[in-house]
Image (cartoon, rainbow, N blue to C red):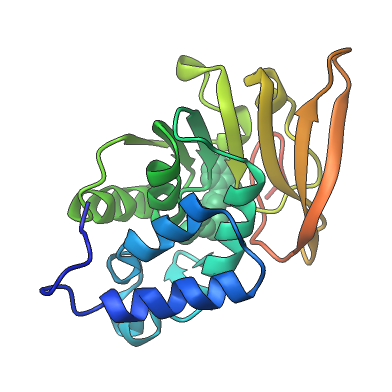
Amino acid sequence: MTRSGPGDSYAGYRANLVESVRRKGVEDLAVLRAIGEVPRHLFVPPALLRSAYEDTSLPIGSGQTISQPSTHARAIAALRLTGHEKVLEVGTGSGYQTALLALCAMTVFSVERVPELATAARSALAKAGIGNVSVLVGDGTLGWRAYEPYDAILVSAGSPDVPAPLIAQLAPDGRLVIPIGNRQAQTLTLVTIAADGAVVRRPVADATFVPLKGTHGFHA
Ligand code: SAH
């Protein structure tokens, strides 16, 4: 992991980013520490380097976007990670959120449908020195059966509903966070399974994500 230090010219920018995310109401210390440590400049296209530490979403190619850091922070905080979890992420994108998750949990399995994005994310994660992640190219609405069950699942694309395979791959006391809505606007939603097996949904925040495309997402 690239640590802040005298040779790291972005450390001051990261400290400012942590402050602005904190001001937006995120209190989870592990998440704030991760934002202070992950070199976001490695995950954005070179032309956008100047904006790497602003709390804004940015285009990452293939028609996709890296979300606002405060949005990642809210979503990860809702998972209430303690550092011991096996996490499934759907929609690797740039790999930045994967990196944040990797610092807050034990292992991260991440699925991305666009091969070029998966390749770039793997290389940025390696450059950042993050090893406890695996990236698979595929349809994440099907989950990743090989490593189920997951203590936490984070979907970073907007979905019409919770894909059934993700519920099936969630550990009994697991937490799933997913933006649910239409293609234009969604509600970031915390999904848990009650003792009687009922699926419980609680709204976390309003959100605007790119569409989750696949078997259990939007079609075409
Ligand atoms: N967390 C990412 C956000 C990327 S945007 C980041 O920090 O950069 C959402 C991503 O979900 C896109 O990369 C898109 O290609 C991907 N995606 C959409 N549908 C998917 C699916 N069914 N399976 C896996 N990835 C999907």
In this picture, residue 165 sits left or right of residue 51: right
Residue 108 lies, in percent from the top left, at 42, 35
In the picture shown, does residue 131 fall above or below 6?
above
Residue 88 lies, in percent from the top left, at 52, 33
Q: Nearer the viewer, residue 138 or 193?
A: 193
Furthest-bottom residue in this view = 50
Residue 90 lies, in percent from the top left, at 55, 41
In this picture, residue 164 sits left or right of residue 122: right
The residue under the point 56% across, 23% down is 150
Furthest-top residue in this view = 196
Furthest-left residue in this view = 7
The residue under the point 56% across, 17% down is 149
Does the rendering let one see residue 100? yes
In the picture shown, does residue 116 fall above or below 105?
below
Q: Image quarter for residue 173?
A: top right
Residue 55 lies, in percent from the top left, at 52, 77
Q: Nearer the viewer, residue 55 or 114?
A: 55
In this picture, residue 105 sits left or right of residue 44: right
Does the rendering let one see residue 156? no
The residue under the point 80% across, 46% down is 160
Q: Image quarter for residue 117?
A: bottom left
